[in-house]
C-alpha cells in the first residue's frame, strides 16, 4: 500500500509536470503575442480589438465550464496573461501604462 | 503571399490553441491540488510546507529561464495559481482567509 508521504510525493511530481507544461505553453503564447505586436506595428493595425477580446473571454469561459474550472477563474486568468502581454509591449515601446489592451 | 489580416488570424488561432492547453492543464492541476488537500486532511498533515514552496519557486524560475520567460513572471504565475488553490480550500472549509499557503 502507498504511504501518505509517498502518495503526496506522487501528487507533487504530477504538479511539477503540469507546471512545466504551463510555463512552456506560456512561453510559446508570449512568442505569438510578440509576433502579433510586431505585425500590428508594421501594418498600422490598432493594438486593441474589443470584438476579439469579447470572443476570447466567451471562449475561455466555455472551455472552463467543459473542463471543470470556474468560468470566473478563466476570465481572471486571461486578465493575468494580458497584463503581462501589456507589460512586454510597454517594455518594448518604453511607454507608461495606458488603458488599451493590445495584441491578446 | 499571406496578407496581414490572414497572418493575424493564424496567430490568433495559435493563441486560442495554446489557451485551450493552458486551461485544460490548469483544470488538471487543480484536480491534483484538491487530492493533496484531501490527503493532508485525512492524515493530519500541515497544509503549508515552506520547503516545498521554496523548491517550487526555484524550479519555476529555472524553467522560466530555459524557456525564455521572465523568472519573476514565473513566480507571479505560481502566486496567482496558489491564490486560487487557497480559494478552493477556503470554499471547501467555509473559512476566512488565513496566511498559510496550503497544498501547492
Image: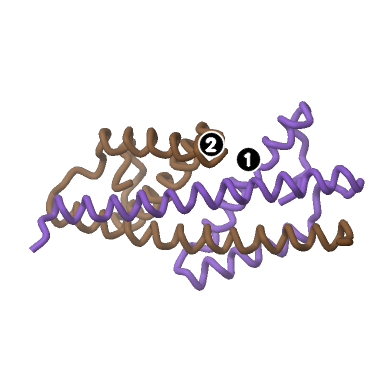
Chain colours: A brown, B purple
Question: Hey, which residue is sitting farthest right in the picture?
Answer: B44
Q: Which residue is mark 2?
A: A73
Count of all numbered marks drawn on residues in the image:
2
Cα gap from disc 1 to disc 2, whole angstroms: 8 Å
Instruction: Give the residue displayed 56% in from the left and 64% down from the top.
Output: A20
Instruction: Give the residue displayed 83% in from the left and 63% down from the top.
Output: A6
- Please indicate whether residue B46 sits to the left or right of residue B102 in the image: right
Question: Hey, which residue is sitting farthest bottom in the picture?
Answer: B66
Chain ID, mark 2: A
Question: Hey, which residue is sitting farthest left in the picture?
Answer: B1
Q: Quadrant of residue B85?
A: top right
Chain ID, mark 1: B
- Please indicate whether residue A57 sits to the left or right of residue B48 in the image: left
Q: Is residue A78 above or below residue B51?
A: above
Query: Would you say the residues marked 1 and 2 are in contact, meaning their CB atoms lie under 8 Å apart?
Result: yes
Instruction: Give the residue displayed 82% in from the left and 48% down from the top.
Output: B39
Q: Is residue B2 above or below residue A48?
A: below
Can you give x and y, in whole percent of width and height, for residue A12 in the image?
72, 60
Q: Tell me if mark 2 has few (under 14), some (14-19) or many (20+) residues whose alpha carbon lies within 10 angstroms of its own.
A: some
Question: What SS does tag 2 mark?
Answer: helix
Q: Quadrant of residue A54?
A: top left
Q: Is residue B74 above or below residue B92?
A: below
Q: Is residue B81 above or below residue A10?
A: above
Q: Quadrant of the N terminus of chain B?
A: bottom left
Q: Tell me if mark 1 has few (under 14), some (14-19) or many (20+) residues whose alpha carbon lies within 10 angstroms of its own.
A: some
Can you give x and y, in whole percent of width and height, for residue B51 in the image?
79, 61
- Please indicate whether residue A101 sits to the left or right of residue A26 in the image: left
Q: Which residue is mark 1?
A: B84
Can you give x and y, in whole percent of width and height, for residue A77 in the image?
49, 42
Front residue of this view, candidates A95 and B7:
B7
Question: What SS does tag 1 mark?
Answer: helix
Amino acid at each position: 500500500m502507498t504511504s501518505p508521504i509517498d502518495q503526496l510525493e506522487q501528487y507533487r511530481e504530477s504538479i511539477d509536470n503540469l507546471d512545466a507544461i504551463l510555463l512552456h505553453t506560456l512561453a510559446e503564447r508570449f512568442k505569438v503575442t510578440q509576433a502579433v505586436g510586431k505585425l500590428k506595428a508594421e501594418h498600422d493595425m490598432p493594438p486593441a480589438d474589443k470584438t476579439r477580446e469579447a470572443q476570447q473571454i466567451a471562449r475561455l469561459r466555455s472551455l472552463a465550464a467543459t473542463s471543470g474550472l470556474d468560468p470566473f477563474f478563466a476570465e481572471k486568468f486571461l486578465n493575468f496573461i494580458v497584463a503581462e502581454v501589456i507589460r512586454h509591449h510597454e517594455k518594448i515601446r518604453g511607454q507608461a501604462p495606458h488603458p488599451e489592451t493590445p495584441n491578446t
